[in-house]
Image (cartoon, helix red, strand yellow):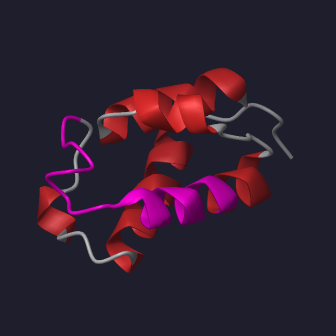
Amino acid sequence: MSTTTDATQVEATVYKALETFGAEPTAINRGATFEELDIDSLDLAELSQIVEDEYGVKFNSSDVENLKTVGDAVDFIVAKA
């Protein structure tokens, strides 16, 4: 089992989570903002729980405030994992 977390894997996890929160699958891309996708703070809290379970990466509230786009979130998770 690989201990490295690659961006493609993280991206797939994040995209899937965003879809379950109601984001339009065709609108999800690295440049999309959470606001555009209609992802609110509760959704982001749930996403952080998924990420913590999956990759052991914890988001604190200041991290979440700094994540504006899907790409920001993916890069943050990859950097911390």
19 vs 27: above or below: below
Q: Is residue 23 left or right of residue 45?
A: left
Q: Is residue 4 left or right of residue 39?
A: right
Q: Nearer the viewer, residue 40 or 7?
A: 40
Q: Is residue 11 left or right of residue 54?
A: left
Residue 20 is covered by the magenta coloring = no
Q: Nearer the viewer, residue 10 or 39?
A: 39
The region drawn magenta spans 31-49
* Residue 37, quarter of picture: bottom left
* Residue 3, quarter of picture: top right
* Residue 47, quarter of picture: bottom right
Q: Position of residue 8 (x, y in %)?
A: 47, 41
Residue 39 is covered by the magenta coloring = yes
Residue drawn at point x = 45 percent, y = 65 percent: 43
Tell how many labels.
Answer: 0
Residue drawn at point x = 74 percent, y = 40 percent: 57
Q: Position of residue 67 (x, y in %)?
A: 41, 33
Residue drawn at point x = 73 percent, y = 31 percent: 81
Q: Is residue 65 left or right of residue 56?
A: left
Q: Position of residue 35 (x, y in %)?
A: 20, 51
Q: Residue furthest top?
A: 79
Q: Position of residue 44 (x, y in %)?
A: 48, 56
Residue drawn at point x = 24 percent, y = 69 percent: 23
